[in-house]
Image: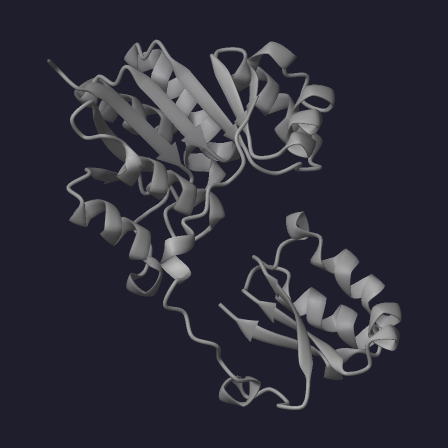
Amino acid sequence: MSCFRVALATTELAVGGAERCLTQLALGLDRQQFAPEVYSLAARPAPARAQLVEQLEQAGIPVHFINATSSSQLPAAISRLSGLLKEQRPELLQTFLFHANVVGTFAARRAGVRRIVHGIRVADPRRWRHWLERIATRHANRIVCVSRSVAKFARHRCGIPTEKIVVIPNGIDLSRFASSQAVSPDQLGLPASKTFFTCVARLDRQKGIDWLLESLPSLLEQFPQHDLLLVGDGPDREILEATARINKIADRVHFLGW
């Protein structure tokens, strides 16, 4: 009996939440029944951030990189992905994140892929994205939303029909942390006398860290022995550092980096 061919496409494959979910899905599929292949619109990530790619390759799952570097290359990305899908001939394409949803839809239609599943993981405020998402999702069989709030956003802001939406929260393999050891603050160059509120996230507007920093002064007044630890990096780091200074809490907010 032949295996059910599955294509999984994402915007990029550096370590991140959506990328980790794609990887866990690909690795978790029963290889007696399914034959997965993975597609990234971006180039192969730098070695320090290529752990997910390495996991996929070690498991014998083919990984393809489209090498698109900007939105102007989307037509070329559609053409390249379409060609790769024609070679694999998947019975289903599942996409993760906005760019992969859009590019994947048009590439799949060119390649004759009959079943398309999209993934919506954030409530992005940009209206032009809502418009493109609405066009792309017309051709999708199902839309996987990561939470009920994102599903509500998809219905009301993107105009996606309720009957197409399925909510599947992130799965977390707790066994990965069974042998984890605590790290003391001084090992990270932090004040040993402090307790930390900790946020692990990409430093991007989507994550709401600007709101967190605006709300933080009153919280720190209630908890004078606590500081905030931000673990992660992203395009808004300088803006967030400035926000901490403006709110006079720069000495209580620690940016640990990626």
Q: Quadrant of the N terminus?
A: top left
- Between residue 144 and residue 177, name the one nearer to us: 177
Q: Position of residue 114 (x, y in %)?
A: 34, 9
Regarding residue 128, the answer to whether it shows in the image is yes
Image coordinates of residue 254 in percent, x first then y, are 65, 77
Name which residue lies at 83% across and 63% down.
214
Q: Does 66 sit above or below residue 230?
A: above
Q: Position of residue 177 (x, y in %)?
A: 41, 61
Coloring basis for residues? one colour
> Can the viewer see residue 65 in this picture?
no
Give the residue displayed 42% in from the left and 29% down from the top.
Answer: 95
Q: Quadrant of residue 202?
A: bottom right
Give the total of numbered labels: 0
**In the rendered image, which quarter is residue 148 located in?**
top right
Residue drawn 24% across and 32% down? 37
At x 81% / y 67%, what residue is drawn?
216
Query: Residue 150 or 10: which is nearer the viewer?
Result: 150
Instruction: Provide residue 201's location: percent of width, then percent of height.
Output: 57, 58
Q: Residue furthest left?
A: 1
Q: Quadrant of residue 82?
A: top left
Q: Is residue 131 above or below residue 115?
A: below
Q: Please state if 190 lies on the left or on the right of 3 as rendered.
A: right
Q: Is residue 32 left or right of residue 164?
A: left
Q: For this rendering, which residue is in front, 155 or 139?
A: 155
